[in-house]
Image (cartoon, helix red, strand yellow):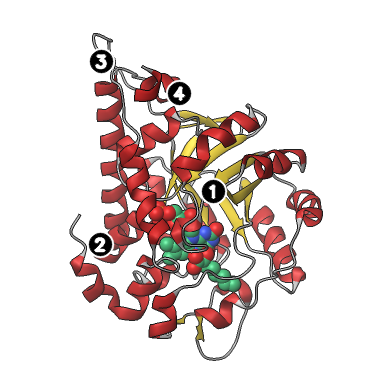
Amino acid sequence: MDDTDLLDILGDGAHGYFAGGAGDEITLRANETSWSQVRLAPRVLVDVSERDPSVTLLGKQRPSPIVVAPMAYQKHVCPDGELASARGAARTGSGYVLSSQTTTAPTVVGPEVSDPWFQLYVFRDRQVSLDLVAQARESGYEALVLTVDFPVAGWRERDKRTGFRVEHPVALNLDGPPLTTEELFALHDPSLTWDDIGAFAEAAGMPLLLKGVLRPDDAERAVDAGAAGIIVSNHGGRQLDTVLTGAEALPPIVDAVAGRADVLVDGGIRRGWDVAKALALGADAALVGRPVLWGMARGGEEGAVAVLEQLHAELDSTLALLGVPNARDLDRGALVSQV
Ligand SMILES: Cc1cc2nc3c(=O)[nH]c(=O)nc-3n(C[C@H](O)[C@H](O)[C@H](O)COP(=O)(O)O)c2cc1C
Ligand SMILES: CCCCCCC(=O)C(=O)O
C-alpha cells in the first residue's frame, strides 16, 4: 500500500510515533510478513452462498471477529480522535478497545460503540489506574484489557530523534505543557508482577484480558490468575525488537489455553485473509491497529469506516474462496500444513 502521503499529513514527529517500532524495526516488519507466510488450503465445491463472519467473544455473539486495537493519543491523527475510530468500529460491527492514553474521555467514547472494552496501564501512582478502572466500569465498558508488555517503553529511535510531544491523555489529569513520549512513559509502574493481577481482576468487576502475552507458560499463568482472555501481541513491534510475531506465538498459546479463556491476536494484520488465518490458527478474534489510524489520517471517521469495510469485504471473499462460509468454523484444517 502506498503510504507516502502519511508523512505529509502527520508531520515527522507524529508520523514517527504512530508508524514507528522499536530498535531496527525488525519485528515491526516481521509482523506483516509472518501472516503472508501462513498459506491457506481452500476446499472446493462447498456451498458458500451464505457467509457469516460472526464469532463468540466473552460468551457473547459478536457480528465480526475484527476489533480495533487500543491506540494512544488519537487526536494527533485527526481532530475527532477516538470518536472517529469508535464510530468507525460501530458502523462496521467491529469491536473496539479504548486506550487509557485516550485524548477523548472514556465517558464520551463509550456510548458511541456497543460493548466497548477499556485498556489499562498501571501507573506508579496505582490510584490513578484504579480510578480509571472505576471510570470504565461506571461508563458501561464490557471488559478490562490490562496491557502487560510495557514495564518500560521500547527503544524507539524515531521518537528520540524527533522529540515528539504529546497532547495530554485526558484520563491522567495532567497540567502544564505537552510532554515528550519519554516523559509520559516514565509514569508507568515497572514493578507490576503476577502478584498484582488478582487485585486488578477483582477491582475490575468485569472480565479481565491480559494484552501482550507471547509465551504459552505466561498464557497459562494468566488463566490461572483469573483472566477471561489473552491478547497475543508484541505491541505492534513497538516494545522489544526481534521478538516473535503474533502469528508465530499464537498456535502454542491456543494449545496451552485449551479453551479455558478467549485468545485474541494482533500485529501486522492488514488484510481480511490475515484475519481468517488468525482464526484458523485458533484465535477467537483479531485486533487491527495502524490501518485504522491511516484511514483516520486520510479521512477521519469516514476513513476509519473505509478501512474497516474493506477488511470485512476481504474477509467475506476469503470465507467464500476458502470453502469455509462461517468464520467460527475456521480451524487449522484450512491451512497448508494440515492438508
Ligand atoms: C500509535 C500506537 C499507539 C498504541 N497505543 C497503545 C495503547 O495505548 N495501549 C495498548 O495496549 N497498546 C497500544 N498500542 C498497540 C496496539 O494496541 C496493537 O497491539 C498494535 O498496534 C497492533 O499492531 P498493528 O498496528 O500492526 O496492527 C499502540 C500501537 C500504536 C501503533
Ligand atoms: C504512560 C504513557 C504510555 C503510553 C503508551 C502508548 C503506547 O502503548 C505506545 O505508544 O505504544
Q: Nearer the viewer, mark 4 or mark 1?
A: 4
Label 2, label 4: how many angstroms apart (C-alpha)?
32 Å
Tell me, for residue 328, which label it has, or none.
4
Provide residue 38's location: percent of width, then percent of height: 35, 34
Front residue of 197/82: it is 197
Residue assigned mark 3 = 49
Q: Residue at x 26, y 36 (%)?
A: 314
- Name the residue beneath numbered marker 1: 116
Name the N-terminal-most of marks 2 and 4: 2
Frontmost residue, 198 versus 36: 36
Residue at point 62% right, 75% down? 172
Residue kind at label 1, given as amino acid type: Pro
Q: Which residue is mark 2?
A: 299
Q: Residue at x 18, y 59 (%)?
A: 2
Badge 3: residue crowd in 10 Å (few <14, some 14–19, many ≥20):
few
Q: Say if mark 4 contacts mark 3, CB within 8 Å.
A: no
Q: What residue type is disc 4 on?
A: Arg
Bin the neighbour count of mark 1 within 10 Å (Cα to Cα): few under 14, some 14-19, many 20 and up.
many
